[in-house]
Amino acid sequence: MRIRSSSTEDLPEIMRIQSRTPQAAQWSQGDYTQLASDAAGLILVVELDRTTPPTLAGFAAFHQVMDEAELRNMAVDPAHQRHGIGRELLREGARLLAEQGVRKIYLEVRASNLAAQRLYYSAGFGLRVRRTDYYHDPREDALVLSLDRL
């Protein structure tokens, strides 16, 4: 497994993984292009190097504002979930952001997405606030979590 910054060639695979992961935010290709072109944006991808060519198995999209960052979107292909890929994306993202002076990372997660919550809590994130009826289609609360120990 290798984690690296995304390139424009990764966009079709990022979109494929996103489409196979309905719990992830469903962004357009333009959303990723815009974040990747922003100096404060960071999109990481995981390559499984045991295949030729290497297979993209997941991604994480971050945005930095001064000494804080937000995990904007993250997904791991369902065929590769529960193998530590999400945890490694979070770890590498936190490491790279800390090198840029980030002291805290925030994220929002649906209250019903228990698998993601387990991952985030086990990675050191803590609950900060619950936003009632934040999401639509379906209407649902959002949990705002943060990681304070970078």
Image: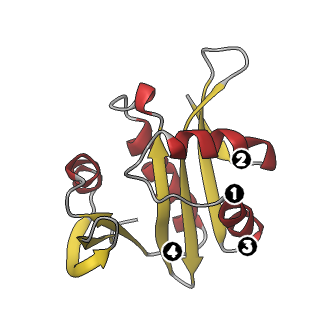
Q: Which residue is mark 1?
A: 29
Residue identified by numbered label 2: 11
Of the residues under marks 3 and 1, which one precedes in the sequence? 1
Query: The residue under label 1 is which amino acid type?
Result: Gln
Q: Quadrant of the N terminus?
A: top right
> Residues at badges 1 and 2 in contact (C-beta under 8 Å)?
yes
- Which is more toward the observer, 45 or 14? 14
Between 140 and 106, the one lying in front of the other is: 140
**Which mark sits nearer the N-terminus, 3 or 2?**
2
- Secondary-structure class at tag 3: loop
Within 10 Å of disc 2 (Cα), the crowding (few <14, some 14-19, many 20+) is some
Q: Nearer the viewer, mark 3 or mark 2?
A: 2
| Residue 45: image location, x then y, percent | 61, 43
CA separation in Å, label 1 and label 4: 26 Å
Residue nearest the viewer, comparing 38 with 149: 38
- Percent x, y for residue 38? 73, 73
The three-letter amino acid code for the residue at tag 3 is Asp
Q: Nearer the viewer, mark 1 or mark 2?
A: 1
Q: Write the residue at 66% across / 38% down.
A: 13
- Per the image, the residue denoted by label 4 is 102
Question: Which element carries disc 1, helix, strand or loop?
Answer: helix
Residue 141, given in percent of the width and then of the height, sits at: 22, 73
Instruction: Identify the element where label 4 is drawn.
Output: loop
Q: Are marks 1 and 4 in contact (CB under 8 Å)?
A: no
Which residue appears at 23% of the width and 50% of the height?
A: 122
Looking at marks 2 and 4 on the same chain, the residue that comes earlier in the sequence is marked by 2
| Amino acid type of the residue tagged 4 in the rendering | Val
Q: Which mark is residue 38?
A: 3
Relative depth, front residue between 79 and 134 = 134
The residue positioned 51% from the left and 58% from the top of the image is 26
Spatial distance from mark 4 to mark 3, Cα to Cα? Answer: 16 Å
Which residue, as the protein is rendered here, is positioned at the far bottom? 66
